[in-house]
Amino acid sequence: ILNVEQSPQSLHVQEGDSTNFTCSFPSSNFYALHWYRWETAKSPEALFVMTLNGDEKKKGRISATLNTKEGYSYLYIKGSQPEDSATYLCAFMVGNAGGTSYGKLTFGQGTILTVHP
Amino acid sequence: GAGVSQSPSNKVTEKGKDVELRCDPISGHTALYWYRQSLGQGLEFLIYFQGNSAPDKSGLPSDRFSAERTGGSVSTLTIQRTQQEDSAVYLCASRSRRSEAFFGQGTRLTVV
């Protein structure tokens, strides 16, 4: 059973605050780590797909880092806005000996972010 | 189509009835996933298809649940003899190699 853990479970911040969350995953047989944003009454939408140790990706005020050797990824939001309120999910893909992937996406439980005006 | 399409969007069924949920993935996407979200819970993995075969169906909760995929495209998730604990939002996603997953809008199943 793959363990993908996210912390904190929920977070309340004020508009303008910067914040970050953590995703922990198995450090062996890594293939890819995905981040998704899931807004209420919508479907999850991808933020980042990260594949290389040391990867840093950025989209606007949101960025993510990846450490495959120790098995964690951080998601950062700079200057939070009320529209950033959502559940942020990470998903882990395990690789096989051939350097490809079994393809299964295992999600963490998510971090629920609420940004207060 | 342009995105992943699921039908129906809402389904209310009586306990003990069978239901079929349909997923139309993005054309050309070889991988297809079924997840569900029960009230207050995260995304629970059900089954994953690569083409028409299912390398991992470990998340199916019981033998009342089955899924198939035909032509490397449409997938159907069938729940037989529904129970109240089957009530959830069922989400389908598809992806191509090395891409992110694209999700459908989900089917909200309510068993009364």
Image (tube, rainbow, N blue to C red):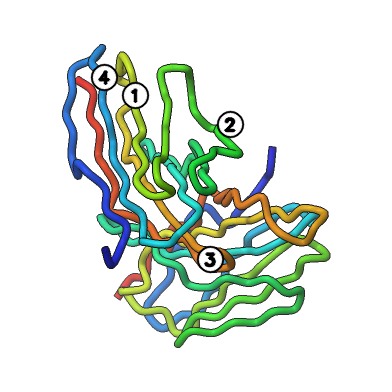
> Are the residues flagged by discs 2 and 1 in contact, CB closer than 8 Å?
no
Residue found 73% across the figure and 74% down from its top: A52
Residue that mark 4 sits on: B18
- Dot 1 alpha-carbon crowd within 10 angstroms: few under 14, some 14 to 19, many 20 or more: many
Residue that mark 2 sits on: B58
The amino acid sitting under disc 2 is Ser
Callout 3 secondary element? strand
Q: Are marks 1 and 3 on the same chain?
A: no
Callout 4 secondary element? loop
Q: Are marks 2 and 1 on the same chain?
A: yes
Provide the chain ID for the residue under circle 2: B
Q: CA distance from mark 1 to mark 4?
A: 6 Å
> Are the residues flagged by discs 3 and 2 in contact, CB closer than 8 Å?
no
Compared to B29, does B41 lie above or below?
above
- The numbered mark, 1 or 4, whose residue comes first in the sequence reads 4
* Drawn side of residue B58 relative to residue B34, left or right: right
The amino acid sitting under disc 1 is Ile
